[in-house]
Amino acid sequence: MFKRLTYGMVGGSKDSQIGIVHRKAINLHGKAELVCGSFSRNFKNTLATGKELKIDEKRLYRNYEEMAEEESKRPDKIDFVSIVTPNSSHYEVAKKFLESGINVMCEKPLTITLKEAEELKHLARRNNLLFAVAYTYTGYSMLRYARELIKRGEIGEVRFINGRYISEWMAKVPFAGKNARHEWRSDPKVSGLSNCVADIGVHVDNVVSFLTGLKIKTLIARMDKFVEPDRLDDNASILINYDNGAEGIYWTSQIAVGHENTLDIGIYGAKGSIEWSQEHANYLKISKVNHPFITLSRGSEKVDDFIKNDYVTPGGHQEGYVEAFARVYDKFINAIAKKKKGELLEQRDLDFPTVEDGVEGMRFIEKCVESTEKGASWVEF
């Protein structure tokens, strides 16, 4: 019988958008219970959030330092922490919990510099702790099935990749000072080197890596600042060369009027192609040379049982964002539980976005910035 784990959260007060999503995702499988938190820099907000979530007031902390130190002393210390704060604090918060012997799930981007990300990777390894990064989209069933098809050579060697993650929210308002919840995203002091590429462009990069296993060799990027020229990017066009000779193009935008949350991926190989859209997540379009294309649904008998075994709802029902996020958390929680029992983890137990993926995400951001600053020139990855 599975014994429920316990976790704490840093950030994610009752008014937080992403903190609520994390909690819903964890709750979906019921394998971990929220028992402590430092939900806000304002302790009154932490207390109010804790009361709403029915958490013992003794385990509501004034700051993350106090939380890490006090939890590490408890015989029933939390099994992991979920970090859902703005980018600039990820490094210090994650570092403190790793030093306190606590596994970490962190929002993306992992940090605001590649150097910080590398330090967290080494610290997690040195302390023998599990570290996951919230690249949610890798949890979708049909993306996981697409990965299997590509591994099996169904579309042949990958030749070209097209990915876009576009939205419109920054185009809607005169931005600075008008949207307190989101304004920090374009502030370099809080967001780091990038807004758009760091917020959603990294998802394209991560999904492509997840599907194909290809590594970027060189890239050229043009990061635009249409809304706030003196702040951070809100749009980017990126050309990619991969290590197998394939090429790709990514478009990521927060000023694409008419798109709320469009993530589309196309993988084109020598024998065929696979296309997937987050807005139609139950389906894969599979095309092969000299064959009519097919649209394969999540309920198809062709989908492998080991993929279906992870379904929350039967294949005929639409799979959503929280379910995909829940799958990422479920893999992470299962790995912690297995490790806690003293069992040796195998590679298949680590089928969630890891700190290594977070490091690669930071490398991608920094290389895009480097290319842009060089006048949109090719840079080595």
Image (cartoon, rainbow, N blue to C red):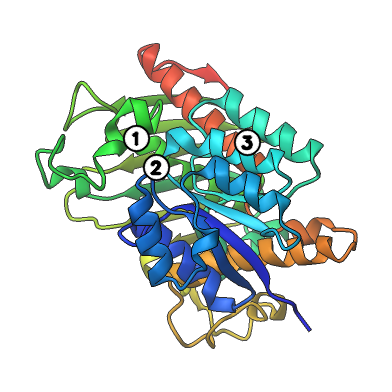
Residue on which disc 2 sits: 199
Dot in front, 2 or 3: 3
Whichever of callouts 2 and 3 sits on the residue coming sooner in the sequence is 3
Res 209 → quadrant: top right
CB-based contact (under 8 Å), mark 3 and mark 1: no
Mark 1 or mark 3, which is nearer the start of the sequence? 3
Disc 2/disc 3 C-alpha distance (Å): 21 Å
Identify residue for label 1. 195
Mark closer to the observer (3, 1): 3
Nearest the camera: 291 or 300?
300
**Left or right: where does residue 140 sit relative to residue 198?**
right
Q: Quadrant of residue 100?
A: top right
Query: How far apart, in angstroms, are the residues tagged by discs 3 and 1?
Result: 23 Å
The image's mark for residue 374 is: none
* Residue at position x 57%, y 26% in the image: 114
Mark 3 = which residue? 95
Visible residue check, residue 190: yes
Asked whether residue 292 appears in the rendered view, the answer is: no
Please tell me whether mark 3 sits on a helix, a strand or a loop: helix
Secondary structure state at the residue bearing disc 1: loop
Q: Residues within 10 Å of mark 3 (few under 14, many from 20)?
A: some
